[in-house]
Amino acid sequence: MKYLCSLFFILCFLNVFSQESFGRTQEYRKKIRKDVTRNLGFCDIDYAIATIGSKDDENVVVCELTQGCETEPYIKIYSDSRYEPPYFYRDIYYTEGDSLKYAIEEELYIDEATKDTIPWNCQYFFENGKLVDYISHGHGPTEMDDWDPELIFRKFAVVIDDN
């Protein structure tokens, strides 16, 4: 009996001090994706910034296109696409008000010799300014031990500063 009471106390203690459950239901993610898709359909590009340059004094051409639009007074969508051989990158950020609601990073490796491609993407879901869930597909940065999903906030801040 003493053993059971001790075990019960330990489990209650761990439950009280455990972190908030990470991740949301499939229905929550579907609703966010549906909102994003619907608003992207209404999105006319408000501005586009194109940059072409070289990377690290190499003979590699880097192309970047940043786009933004506003579908309603409080919904804004930012898209940043760039090609840095052999990778093509695209990031999309969806905001409601001033709060990030959804983001997706896409990376496509293109083997120039064989023309084989290796895709990767990671979708991020936010609530009240906090990252609440993410899902990744393919082979890419999320497989690295030092990958940090919170880096998406810094990448978004750079896109906002550039616009």
Image (tube, helix red, strand yellow):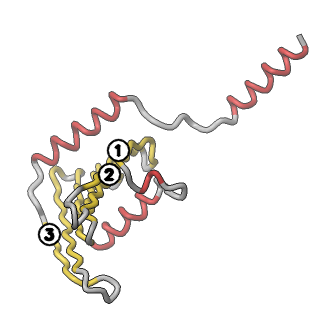
Q: Of label 1 and label 2, which has the lower sequence position?
A: 2
Which residue is labeled 1 in the image? 137
Identify which amino acid the numbered label 3 is placed on.
Ala
Residue 163 appears in the picture as rendered:
no
Q: Position of residue 114 (x, y in %)?
A: 21, 61
Which residue is labeled 2 in the image? 120
Report the disc number at residue 48.
3
Cα separation between marks 3 and 2: 25 Å
For mark 1, give the secondary structure.
strand
Decide which of 1, 40 is in the foreground and name it.
1
Vertical side of 157 occupied by 7: above or below: above
Decide which of 61, 100 is in the foreground and name it.
61
Q: Position of residue 105 (x, y in %)?
A: 32, 55
Cα separation between marks 1 and 2: 6 Å
Name, please, the residue furthest toward the bottom: 57
Q: Residues within 10 Å of mark 2 (few under 14, many from 20)?
A: some
Q: Of label 3 and label 1, which has the lower sequence position?
A: 3
Mark 3 touches mark 1? (CB < 8 Å) = no
Q: Position of residue 6 (x, y in %)?
A: 85, 21
Report the disc number at residue 104.
none
Please state if 18 lies on the left or on the right of 122 as rendered: right
